[in-house]
Image: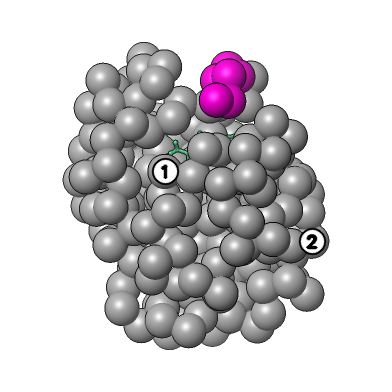
């Protein structure tokens, strides 16, 4: 057995039915497409993934003890079991042009995993994952809600997102302190936003820096021109803006006007 390590966010799922349900949440058009499982641990999802995706499955886990366990239990995967950190490992050669991701993510780094997925958004077609319920809800929440935040906007710009179901803490060993949620992300057909995407990210991040402020105040560090400061949209808070409104705001800022220095 693998001893659960807290610093690696290891909570092993014990309920086979739920494991199967998570694997079944990958849509059927994934047949034949490479699938990456992040953090397989002791392989509770892997056993079902092998049945469905066999030779197109690749695993990555940072824990050497899990890697030994996985190699022993899934010898058929052989060199497709990678020991390493998903956040830093370059997987492009291994995964090819298009692939999907599945995993019960280590909750302590789930946001970082999503920022990495965003960097790979031209390659990652679909993601099915379990994470802290609260975070899962935040990611899928629409504009206007208190839970809507930076990652909700950035991810929803490129992915259609769906909250699938909640998982109780008691089905894990050891049980986490919080409930979990399973979500699915499917790449939409937006190749590029119709604005400067680097500036878009900057505006979204800065806008949510202090989410109770109006955008006029929150975006002050970006040295807005007087012309832009006068725009009515800046009376709003970041949490009110749709992706499209952020795109439009970004274009206004890029067009500059007056003394804007961004
Ligand atoms: N999928 C298993 C384990 C989930 S626990 C199950 O459902 O039971 C999270 C897993 O992510 C652990 O196996 C842990 O070792 C792994 N992990 C933690 N940080 C990681 C990282 N940076 N890169 C890859 N795997 C990581």
Q: Is residue 33 left or right of residue 23?
A: right
Relative depth, front residue between 121 and 191: 121
Identify residue for label 1: 44
Nearer the N terminus, badge 1 or badge 2?
1
**Badge 1: how crowded within 10 Å, few (<14), some, or many (20+)?**
some
Identify residue for label 2: 90
The reply to whether the residue tagged 1 has its Cβ within 8 angstroms of ligand 1 is yes
Q: Residue at x 76, y 45 (%)?
A: 84
Q: Is residue 162 left or right of residue 35?
A: left
Query: Do the residues under discs 1 and 2 have CB atoms within 8 angstroms?
Result: no
Residue 191, compared with residue 5, is above or below; it is: below
- In the picture, the quarter occupied by the N terminus is top right
Asked if residue 4 is among those painted magenta in the image, a careful observer would answer yes
Rendered location of residue 168, percent (x, y) = 23, 27
The kind of secondary structure element at disc 2 is loop
Q: Residue at x 38, y 70 (%)?
A: 52
Rendered location of residue 167, percent (x, y) = 24, 34
- In the picture, the quarter occupied by the C terminus is bottom right
Main SS, magenta residues: loop
Range of residues picked out in magenta: 1-6
Residue mark closest to the camera, 1 vs 2: 1
Q: CA distance from mark 1 to mark 2?
A: 25 Å
Whether residue 199 can be seen here: no
Q: Quadrant of ligand 1?
A: top right
Looking at the rendering, which quadrant does residue 65 occupy? top right
Q: Residue at x 40, y 21 (%)?
A: 173
The kind of secondary structure element at disc 1 is loop
Looking at the rendering, which quadrant does residue 99 occupy? bottom right
Residue 171, compared with residue 227, is above or below; it is: above
Rendered location of residue 62, percent (x, y) = 70, 39
């Amino acid at each position: 057995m693998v001893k659960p390590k807290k610093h690696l966010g290891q909570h092993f799922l014990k309920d086979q039915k739920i494991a199967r349900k998570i694997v079944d949440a990958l849509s059927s058009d994934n047949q034949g497409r490479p699938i990456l499982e992040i953090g397989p641990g002791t392989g509770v999802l892997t056993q079902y993934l092998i049945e469905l995706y066999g030779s197109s499955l690749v695993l990555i886990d940072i824990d050497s003890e899990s890697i030994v366990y996985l190699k022993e239990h899934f010898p058929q995967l052989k060199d497709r079991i990678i020991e390493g950190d998903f956040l830093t490992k370059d997987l492009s050669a291994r995964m090819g042009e298009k692939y999907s991701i599945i995993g019960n993510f280590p909750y302590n780094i789930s946001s970082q995993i999503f920022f990495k997925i965003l960097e790979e958004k031209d390659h990652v077609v679909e993601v099915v994952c379990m994470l802290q319920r609260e975070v899962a809800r935040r990611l899928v929440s629409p504009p206007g809600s208190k839970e809507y935040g930076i990652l909700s906007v950035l991810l929803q710009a490129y992915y259609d997102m769906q909250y699938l179901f909640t998982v109780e803490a008691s089905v894990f060993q050891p049980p986490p302190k919080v409930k979990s949620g399973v979500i699915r992300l499917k790449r939409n057909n937006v190749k590029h936003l119709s604005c400067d995407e680097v500036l878009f990210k900057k505006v979204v991040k800065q806008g949510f820096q202090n989410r109770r402020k109006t955008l006029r105040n929150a975006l002050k560090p970006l040295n807005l021109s007087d012309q832009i400061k006068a725009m009515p949209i800046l009376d709003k808070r970041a949490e009110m803006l749709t992706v499209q409104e952020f795109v439009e705001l970004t274009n206004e800022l890029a067009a500059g006007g007056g003394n804007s220095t961004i």
